[in-house]
Amino acid sequence: MWRSVDEILQRETIEVVYQPIVNHAEGVICAHEALSRPQYGGRFIPPDVWFRAAYESDRSMEADLLALTISVNRLRLLPPEISAMPLYVNVMPSSFVQESFVERLEVLFREGLCQPGQLVIEIVEYISYDPTLLSQMIKSIRSLGVRIALDDVGAGSTSLAGLLEFDPDFVKVDRTVIQGISISSSKQRFLSRLVRFMESGNSVIAEGVENYEDLNAIREAGVNVSQGYYWSRPMSISELSDLVSEIESKRTELANLARNRDRSLTDKAVVEKSQELDTLIYLYHRLFHNDL
């Protein structure tokens, strides 16, 4: 596996997909999470396998910085409505404890690839860590203006210890807690207490939402933000770009129809064109609003 890590880092064969994070209380996308998809031998490596392999090869920081740089660079290809949104990126705890990681972040900001306030670093649970030691390095990263999210809360004891030690800006609740929460009173109590602990329903993000029943349950628990296949599968930058282009094309067509009505153009044609646009917008969860 070490050989595959070396080759992936050398050839930079990491694809990145983006999954929307939705403020369902307001009905809008509020951020994206960048998800790395390393490839070796024509196959994708599962995230947990990749993180552990990079860590065991003592290449975790290189892997994290490569994924971060690719994520930021590709997102910049899209219109500001998307590219300027907060971006959540997974980082291994082993990268945090290296002072050079902070220095590389500073370089990234100086080069203008990303604004510090836009970046949200997720501390992943795949690699165990000492919360007390990690909290000292988190202070340095926060001093740059970067926000911190604690990933996979509820999946293990380490994340719960981090919740007390780090005072994170956001917590992402693991899918094992969210899936089936509509029929589990214990999960509902846990989530409600977590919202009270964070003192904000916007600081708790429910991961793995796949159906309306679970979405309604997390709403009742006070959570305003969620992520999962109920909203959207992760999309490549080309898929996002195509969707944005198609939305803008349909909006232009609708605007032209509305402005250039003649006797041959019926209200039905305008309605049909508007429905096409609404369908596309729904796919991207009302990121773009039709205000014609």
Image (spheres, rainbow, N blue to C red):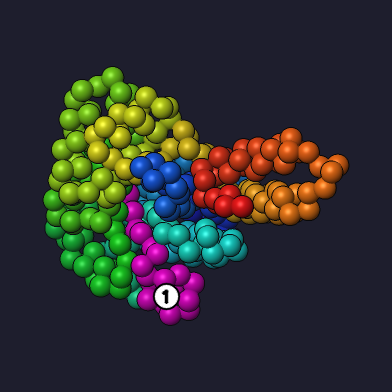
Quarter location, residue 138: bottom left
Judging depth in this view, the residue of 92 and 229 nearest the camera is: 229
Circle count:
1
Q: Is residue 46 visible?
A: yes
For this view, does 223 lie left or right of residue 267? left
In the image, residue 28 lies at what x, y percent? Answer: 44, 47
Query: Residue 265 in the image: x percent, y percent?
Result: 81, 42
In-front residue for pair 256/252: 256
- Residue 162 lies left or right of residue 58; in this view the side is left
In the rendering, at what x and y percent does residue 146 appear?
32, 66
Residue lying farthest to the top in this orientation: 183
Vertical placement of residue 94 versus 227, above or below: below
Q: Write the residue at 40% across / 64% down.
A: 118
226 relative position to 40: left or right? left
Residue farthest to the bottom?
110
Say which element carries label 1: helix
Above or below, comparing residue 63 to residue 157 in the picture? below
Amino acid identity at mark 1: Phe
* Crowd band around label 1 with a 10 angstrom C-alpha radius: few (<14), some (14–19), many (20+): few
Along the line of sight, the residue nearer the viewer: 40 or 215? 215
| Residue at 35% over, 59% down | 120
Q: Which residue is mark 1?
A: 109
Residue 43 visible to an observer of this rendering: no
Provide the residue span drawn in magenta.
104-124
Residue 109 forms part of the magenta stretch: yes
Left or right side of 37 for 101:
left
Q: Quadrant of residue 183?
A: top left
- Is 223 magenta? The answer is no
**Image point 39% across, 35% down: which residue?**
208
Residue sticking out furthest to the front: 263
